[in-house]
Image: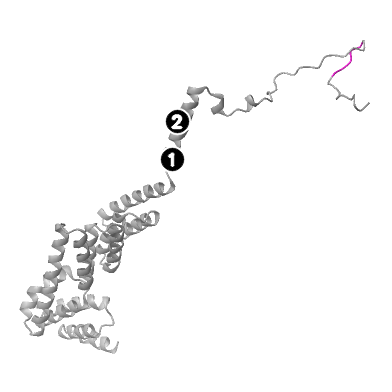
Amino acid sequence: EIAHWRPRRNTKRTSEGKLKPPVKRTGMPASSSSAMETPKKALNGEEAAKFDAHSKDEKLASPPLSMDSKTLAEAKKKEGNAKFKERYFRQAIALYAEAINLYNKEKSFYTNRAAAYMKLNLYAEAAADCEAATEIDNKFAKAYQRGAASYTHLGDYEKAEALLKKGNKANPYDVNIRSEITKLKSVVKRKRELTDAVKEQKYEKAMLLLPAMEKFVTRDVDVGILTLRAYLGVKRYQKALKTASEWYQRYPSNIELLHLRGCALYYTGQSCKLRLYLKF
């Protein structure tokens, strides 16, 4: 009986006892493989080729994540440039920093931030950014120029010279780098002449040398001391006091600056302030 067993069909008997044929159901999805075909398989040959080409174009058009980051970084740079033109240098620095955080392989992000730093007299930070830009592109003349100018303001002439030599080697025909080298030599020469003039108490000659030094060297404490001695020597006491106060804020622990500021207070008749100053 088991050998002749057949599964029961979905049939019903009529009132006369005859079997009804199985009901054929419609509206249901066919279980064949054709119903499960992908859109590509359902297409004919020509349409399938177009489908492949379209899919390939979509893959090529999809930008990688780094490309998106670079695009966003460029947008931040443009915002920073706008703030720089409006002379909002701190905001510009913040925007350039965001650009660098998004994409740190673009040299102009660093030199632009260096320019903003220089406007705020933050020459150490500017020099560091210019050095970073030269690491990205060793032929980027602007980085060597701004970096050398920053080192010169700090009075670090050796680093300025070394950076310009590196730039001149990478760009032997760049006129701007050669001009910066000439300017650096002139500044070093003028500082030597200023030192000799103050030492020999030729204060009028020292005064003629000051404008160029004050323009290119604003953070060299030796130049600051020479400047104060020259002002005191020609009896420009109010100017000496103002300059001494500025340098004192930058280098409050420098003994010679403290002494010269005290002299300026004495010669301007501010004896009360001088007493408090000496007690301090």
- Judging depth in this view, the residue of 216 and 186 nearest the camera is 186
Q: Quadrant of the N terminus?
A: top right
Q: Is residue 13 magenta?
A: yes
Q: Residue at x 38, y 49 (%)?
A: 72
Measured Cα–Cα span from mark 2 to mark 1: 14 Å
Q: Predominant secondary structure in magenta?
A: loop
| Element class at badge 2 | helix
**Residue 202, can we see it?**
yes
Task: Pinpoint residue 260: horizontal percent, then vertical percent.
Answer: 19, 84
* Residue at image location 31% in from the left, 50% down from the top: 78
Which amino acid lies under the numbered mark 2 shown in the image of this protein?
Answer: Ala
Pointer 2: residues within 10 angstroms few (<14), some, or many (20+)? Answer: few
Q: Position of residue 254 (x, y in %)?
A: 26, 83
The answer to whether the residue labelled 2 contacts the one labelled 1, judged by CB atoms less than 8 Å apart, is: no
Q: Is residue 29 left or right of residue 38?
A: right
Please give the label number shown on residue 62: 1
Note whether 224 is above or below 109 in the view shown: below
Q: Residue furthest front?
A: 3
| Magenta-tinted stretch | 11-15
At which x and y percent is residue 74?
Answer: 34, 49
Identify which amino acid the numbered label 1 is placed on.
Answer: Ser
Residue marked by disc 2 = 53
